[in-house]
Amino acid sequence: MGVVSSPMTSNSIEVAGLRKDFGSLRAVDNISFAVAEGEIFGFLGPNGAGKTTTQRLLTGVLRPTAGDIRIMGRDLRKDPVAAKRHVGVVPENANPYRDLSAWHNLMLMGRLYGMAKKRREQKALQLLEYFGLLDRRRAKTKTLSKGLNQRISLSMALIHDPRLLFLDEPTSGLDVESTRLIRRLIVDLNTRGVTVFLTTHDMQEAARLCDRVAIVCRGRIAAIDSPDALRADFSSAQSVEVAFEKPLRDPALLQELASVSGVRQEKGKYILFTDRPGEVACRVALLARERGLGLRSINTRAARLEDVFVHLTAAKGSGNGER
């Protein structure tokens, strides 16, 4: 059974024929891919697509129904301790021990990884300073906000200097300051050679940070490549964005225009997907004049990663429930 190789030669993650069934529900359906050492790899998909289940399989939380997983060159099933030794994991919901302080959470995690006391104390101070937590290090985590707890979770995952970091929706529901800090951390870590596996639904975050992304739908990989390459490949995800001065009583008229493959309404505007945006823009302008709608604005735009995502997931269906 072959592994889908990444463009680089050395891989931090290798997956072949991975499958996970929950009774009659197939959450992950025979996927194969590889993540190169030093990559920021995005794993994108709608709710229920199999993103979190896949990450739990890759981190050993769940056992696969079938397939092989190699982490840092080690077989996760046969040699789990060695496979996880250089891995850090940050789940979507921050998971520090609530009755322990930030400091004691870090000390506990350092001991679990077998770090000497002096080394774990030194590293904990560095991390607490980086995340702006030094003045909160004695506070029990149950008294702190979601954003601060997420920073503590990141510190716990980084205490042993992992070579591979799994992040599951790391900025979901966080304040602007925490979001910016975490995104900066991802770039800083990657610059130092850490491989990052990022599960997210934030298309802008993925496009900004990731070297490559996999778009998953119904437990399968619908596409995998760099954000730029995906945008270039999906010429049909180019679009015309239009806002009329008067309400359009029959939006179906836009769908009926030649060369329009799909229409989406978004914040008072219509997005018309097409592989011929110039021609469609002319047709929209003519329609507005004939119907007396007037044009507030009209723009053509290249495909965005979000457009590619919508195009793929709409075509294949969004899944069968949370996974």
Image: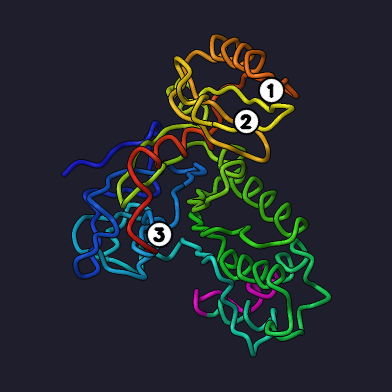
Amino acid type assigned to the residue bearing label 3 in the image: Gln
Q: Earlier in the sequence, mark 3 or mark 1?
A: 3
Q: Residues within 10 Å of mark 3 (few under 14, many from 20)?
A: many
Question: Which residue is nearer to you in this view: 31 or 186?
Answer: 31
Amino acid type assigned to the residue bearing label 2 in the image: Leu
SS at circle 3:
helix
For residue 9, which quarter of the picture?
top left
Mark 3 sits on what residue? 55
Residue range in magenta is 112-124
Magenta highlight: main SS? helix
Question: Which residue is nearer to you in this view: 100 or 50?
Answer: 50
Residue 2 belongs to magenta span: no
Tell me whether circle 1 and circle 2 mark residues in contact (CB < 8 Å).
Answer: yes
What is the number of the mark on residue 317? Answer: none
Residue 116 belongs to magenta span: yes
SS at circle 2:
loop
Residue 32, image x, y percentages: 27, 45
Amino acid type assigned to the residue bearing label 1 in the image: Leu
Q: Residue at x 68, y 75 (%)?
A: 121
Mark 2 sits on what residue? 248
Q: Residues within 10 Å of mark 2 (few under 14, many from 20)?
A: some
Cα–Cα gap, marks 2 and 3: 44 Å
Mark 1 sits on what residue? 293
Q: Residue at x 46, y 61 (%)?
A: 86
Q: Earlier in the sequence, mark 1 or mark 2?
A: 2
Q: Reply above or below: 6 against 79.
A: above
